[in-house]
Amino acid sequence: MPISPLRPQLSEASAPLTHDVEVIDERGRRSVIAIPAERPLTVYVDKRELVTLMTLGGAPEALILGYLRNQRLVKSIAEIESVQVDWSVDSVAVVTRNGIADVEERTSKKVVTTGCGQGSVFGGLMDEIDQIALPPEARLRQSVVYKIVDIIRTQHSIYKQAGSVHGCALFTSQGELLYFFEDVGRHNAVDAIAGRMWLDDVAGGDKVFYTTGRLTSEMVMKGAQMGIPFLLSRSGTTQMGHMVAERVGMSLLSRCSGKHFLLLTGHERLEFEPQLLAAAG
């Protein structure tokens, strides 16, 4: 698909992802280790303060675009004129082309979530999940699940270097890695992918989303809003995450590690390949 001619003007303000600190171990030995960066980023939309996100700072423009998308504050990337990040004041200025209608009313109701790194989501998203229709014909082979798990296992990451971050990735239905983002909270990482998909005009109907974090209701809703029928995690899920996945018809796979996974919802989408386990055992 061609990229929209109304692509917003973006700063390129990626910040350092790690910070060196001196530590002393149990034997009194001193050394220097890397820890993940964490910095506040206050979002202003048309000069109105909206929210402050705590972020690693690796892809702030994509993060903000995905945040606005997943909060349903803007319907199309064409509505956004520019996203300018300024780390000297820890803020980002978003300018829309025509403003956001009823922005105060739409941002007044909040729901506290179990997510880390974000903390709340604007209310009303739960009311919209029944309007989401994921492609019923989408299928995923068991061998592709294993391919995705293996790619994530070998992916160079801040987590391997410094720990204490979450990662999210977008794959094709053939297991080809398209995007990989890490942040201090998994919600930031999924928002960054949503923003990147918007910028590149990438549709979600034939994609697979992977997260290192647990599959809460908000994570499932964000995946559904991006039109993605498959959500994989090396962690588990929650009762409401499971419920939302069933309602939108998403295939939820948790505890993905090695050759093991648990398929919780959307059973008809997964194409099992028993010979893979027979060959391994």
Image (tube, rainbow, N blue to C red):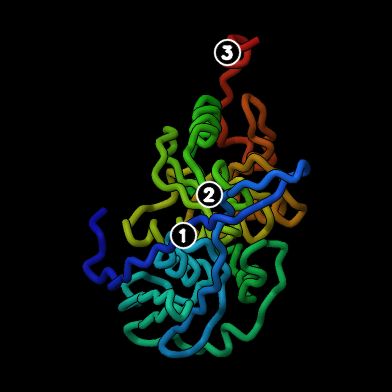
Q: Kindly state the secondary structure of the residue where label 2 is placed.
A: strand
Q: Total label count?
A: 3
For the residues bearing labels 1 and 2, Cβ distance under 8 angstroms: yes
* Structural distance between the alpha carbons of marks 3 and 1: 37 Å
Q: Position of residue 37 (x, y in %)?
A: 54, 60
* Residue drawn at the location 43% of the way across and 51% of the way down: 204
The kind of residue on which mark 1 rests is: Ala
Q: Which residue is mark 3?
A: 275
Q: Kindly state the secondary structure of the residue where label 1 is placed.
A: helix
Q: Position of residue 141 (x, y in %)?
A: 51, 28
Q: Is residue 211 above or below residue 87?
A: above
Q: Which residue is mark 2?
A: 168
* Structural distance between the alpha carbons of marks 3 and 2: 29 Å
Mark 3 surroundings: few (<14), some (14-19) or many (≥20) residues within 10 A: few
The kind of residue on which mark 3 rests is: Gln
* Structural distance between the alpha carbons of marks 1 and 2: 9 Å
Disc nearer the start of the sequence (3/2): 2
* Residue drawn at the location 42% of the way across and 72% of the way down: 75
Q: Position of residue 278 (x, y in %)?
A: 62, 10
Closer to the camera, 274 or 198? 198
The kind of residue on which mark 2 rests is: Cys
> Is 112 on the left-hand or right-hand side of 280?
right
Q: Which residue is mark 1?
A: 192
Q: Kindly state the secondary structure of the residue where label 3 is placed.
A: helix
The answer to whether any part of residue 224 appears in the image is no
> Is 35 on the left-hand or right-hand side of 59?
right
